[in-house]
Amino acid sequence: MARWAGPGLTTRLGRHDFTFDVTLAWATLLYLGLAGFLPLVPVLAYLTLALIVIVRARRKAVTIALLRPVDITCVLTVLWYAPQWGLVVLAFLLLQLLLHWHRFFRNTRAWWRELTRMVAGRLSKDRAS
């Protein structure tokens, strides 16, 4: 929603939408660790290692791949501690998927292509060495 200002238009916030999403996801995981919902040491280890990988790879596909476990962990945590709200979250996610089906699959295919190209490129460089 931050991105949308009409067909073909972008808001100022929309230009930073991905950065904001990433920051919010990492902050949520950190909160879950600090609040005691998840063990803090593994949370900090994951965040630190993921940050190192993201900085080294400098690819959006890598960042997205490292965010998916965070997203799943957040949903599972809600389902574990507040199942009724977890069901609300799942219903909301399903509704979003239904409403944005075409965009979800278009973006997922693009993400997968970028990730596989990057991995294939790294493997071919390693074999050449």
Image (cartoon, rainbow, N blue to C red):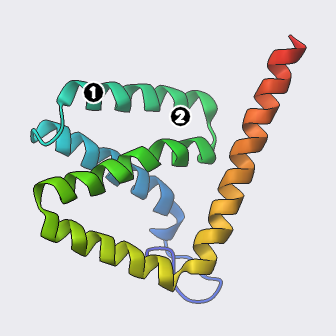
* Amino acid under disc 1: Pro
Q: Residue drawn 43% across and 25% down?
A: 49
- Marked residue nearer the N-terminal end (2 or 1): 1
Is 61 rendered above or below residue 45?
Answer: below
Q: Secondary structure at mark 2?
A: helix
Q: Residue drawn 40% across and 76% down?
A: 94
Q: Indicate the quadrant where residue 21 lies.
A: bottom left
Is 87 rendered above or below residue 41?
Answer: below
In front: label 2 or label 1: 1
Q: Residue drawn 45% across and 31% down?
A: 51
Q: Which residue is mark 1?
A: 42
Residue 17 percent coordinates (x, y): 47, 63
Residue 52 percent coordinates (x, y): 48, 26
Q: Which residue is mark 2?
A: 54
* Amino acid under disc 2: Ile
Is 54 rendered above or below residue 2?
Answer: above
Q: Indicate the quadrant where residue 13 lies.
A: bottom left
- For label 2, the crowd category at 10 Å Cα-Cα, with few meaning under 14, some 14 to 19 and many 20 or more, is some
From the viewer's perspective, tell me whether residue 96 is left or right of residue 27.
Answer: right
State the quadrant of the N terminus: bottom left
Depth check, front residue: 102 or 21: 102
Q: Which mark is residue 113?
A: none
State the quadrant of the C terminus: top right
Residue 112 percent coordinates (x, y): 68, 52
Q: Residue drawn 41% across and 45% down?
A: 69
